[in-house]
Image: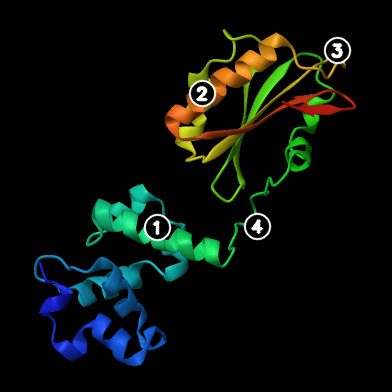
Amino acid sequence: MVNIKNLAKHEQPREKLIEKGVENLRDSELMAILLRTGVEGRDVLKVSEEILSKFPKKKLLSLDFEKLSKIKGIGPGKACLLLSAFELTKRALEVEDNNLPTISSAKDAVAQLQELRTAKKEHFVVLYLNARNQLVHKETISIGTLNASLVHPREVFKPAIEHLAASIIIAHNHPSGEVEASEADVMLTGRLADAGKLLGIELADHIIITEKDYLIL
């Protein structure tokens, strides 16, 4: 395996960065600094050039861990490093996928749940959000009388894990029009909040929706 340190001094990307500034490095040199090591028979700059020739920068940014870690020359450890660098950059630049709605308030959440206002039966729906509070998935967990047997933490958090959600918003409607929370509503909120803490997935809100009103537990 060929390390950056084994390259000639003037060929080392980190030395070039220090001497000439990061803006003067080629894309492959920036990638080489992140990768640090190459693979058998190919130095890290060659590996970087090969990766970037197959995967343009914008495509790289859209790859998930599974796809990124399978690229020859990257692997799981380097995939984690690259994904962290990509995500930090996106957050610094406030880059968002415009196709994903941002949920920054209860009002935004309710806007995604309008079908509950006129539903004749109780629906329990979960909004799954990424770390930038963008809606990445929405799922109806149960239809019918809301109770613990119909809404199990496993069914609520399984999609959260599948969609890499950082937090969730749970919601259900009261067809009766009464917006007040029942004892069962409060107990369910606590149960799911506790389950979320164990998984590292925050329960941001529990919203009760009626035809004309809504309540945040």
Which of the labelled discs sits on residue 176, or is there none?
3
Q: Which residue is mark 1?
A: 84
Q: Is residue 151 above or below residue 165?
A: above
Dot 4: element: loop
- Sequence-wise, which precedes: disc 1 or disc 4? 1
Which of the labelled discs sits on residue 98, or is there none?
4
Tell me if mark 2 has few (under 14), some (14-19) or many (20+) residues whose alpha carbon lies within 10 angstroms of its own.
Answer: some
| Label pair 3/2, CB-CB below 8 angstroms | no
Tell me if mark 4 has few (under 14), some (14-19) or many (20+) residues whose alpha carbon lies within 10 angstroms of its own.
Answer: few
Image depth: mark 2 or mark 1 in front: 2
113 with respect to 70 (left or right): right
Q: Which residue is mark 2?
A: 194
Percent x, y for residue 36? Answer: 22, 69
179 with respect to 106 (left or right): right
Q: Quadrant of the N terminus?
A: bottom left
Residue 143 seen anywhere in this rendered image of the structure: no
Q: Locate residue 80: give its quadrant.
A: bottom left
> What distance separates the C-alpha of mark 1 from that of mark 4?
21 Å
Image depth: mark 1 or mark 4 in front: 1
- Sequence-wise, which precedes: disc 4 or disc 2? 4
Amino acid type assigned to the residue bearing label 2 in the image? Asp
